Image: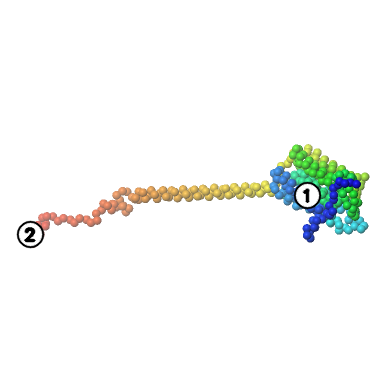
Amino acid sequence: MNLAFIPSPSTGVVHLGPIPLRGYAFCIIIGVFVAVWYGNKRWVARGGSAGTVADIAVWAVPFGLVGGRLYHVITDYELYFSSGRDWVDAFKIWQGGLGIWGAVALGAVGAWIGCRRRGIPLPAWADTLAPGLAFAQAIGRWGNWFNQELYGKPTDLPWALKISAGPDRVAGTYHPTFLYESLWCVGVGLLVIWAGRRFQLGHGRAFALYVASYCVGRAWIEHMRVDYAHRILGLRLNDWTALVMFLLAVTYLVVSAKLRPGREEIVEPAAVEADREARAEDETEATGTTEDTDAKDAKAKAKAEDADGHAGTEADGADPDVPAGEGKSGGPAAADVPDEAPATAEPVGVKAEAQAEKG
């Protein structure tokens, strides 16, 4: 009897009033937010604009969810389309069932659309998001814990996962493969961060490293799982998928390093255009301010000259164009002309004769 084990939740749903909060969906949502948040930090650190990662994620996330569900339904079609099954369950994504391979493949299509609309190269965006995707997977795997699914072989290890009896499961303690993969994904994310800084991985190589290193862990963990899966030549389907993806990722790493070494510079056309317009507006405002200042200076100078001219005229007390001693009419000055002419004196002889005649 195993006395030490990891307990499983008694239910995967918590009701907030009439609203059901499902643990599986909650883990997926938190993982998406972490990937976008951390991806945005890395994008800005490389010189990109804040918000670009989220804008592209608006396209990538829905495509990724659809792709992940499609991969699961196609590879496990018996769960939905065999006798006694209800095909409507294929749309009940909250009950679990997302294939990471389909999520990455179709999510990349959505990301390509978003990057094309923003004029950004997809490889640069994928490199920025790569470690965040690994951390998102680490969080998302805990959704399997809530649903009591995707566990491994029976074990009595102290960290064994206790599974309760159910329609498709037998009670017991099993390898917590969800926990193994969660821890592996954390390690993958840290590896991508370190290698990206150490080797300046660019042009999609950081994303390729994420894919390759994840595939190694996924192939190892698949051997522990006991849930039903299609087998080809004795290997589970996900083992073959991991092998193919690993080879493709490693090939891209090697070829890309030779053809396009180093890390590309992030340039966002929309951001460059906005910066150019902002600079043009600043220059226009600066030019207008200079012209206004010059006009004000010219007016002030003209007023000063007029004031000096009037002051000089008043100080002289006369019109500078009229010669001294003349009035403004051109004649002698008023001070030189007497008010009345003196009477003419009569000769003394004439006066005496007049008096004699009277006598």
- Amino acid, disc 1: Gly
Q: Identify the residue position indicated by label 2 in the image.
A: 356
Q: Residue at x 35, y 48 (%)?
A: 316
Q: Residue at x 92, y 57 (%)?
A: 83
Please say whether residue 346 is visible from this viewpoint. yes
The residue carrying pointer 1 sits among few (fewer than 14), some (14 to 19) or many (20 or more) residues within 10 Å by Cα, namely many
Secondary structure found at label 2: helix
- Amino acid, disc 2: Ala
Q: Residue at x 80, y 40 (%)?
A: 253
Return the residue found at the far left: 359
Q: Identify the residue position indicated by label 1 in the image.
A: 31
Rendered image: mark on residue 42: none
Looking at the image, residue 20 sits to the left or right of residue 170; the answer is left
Rendering quarter of residue 183? top right
Task: Give the position of the C terminus as an image quadrant.
Answer: bottom left
Residue 258: percent from left, percent from top: 78, 37
Task: Work out whether residue 91 or residue 165 is closer to the camera in this orientation and state it.
Answer: 165
The residue carrying pointer 2 sits among few (fewer than 14), some (14 to 19) or many (20 or more) residues within 10 Å by Cα, namely few
Looking at the image, residue 354 sits to the left or right of residue 293; the answer is left
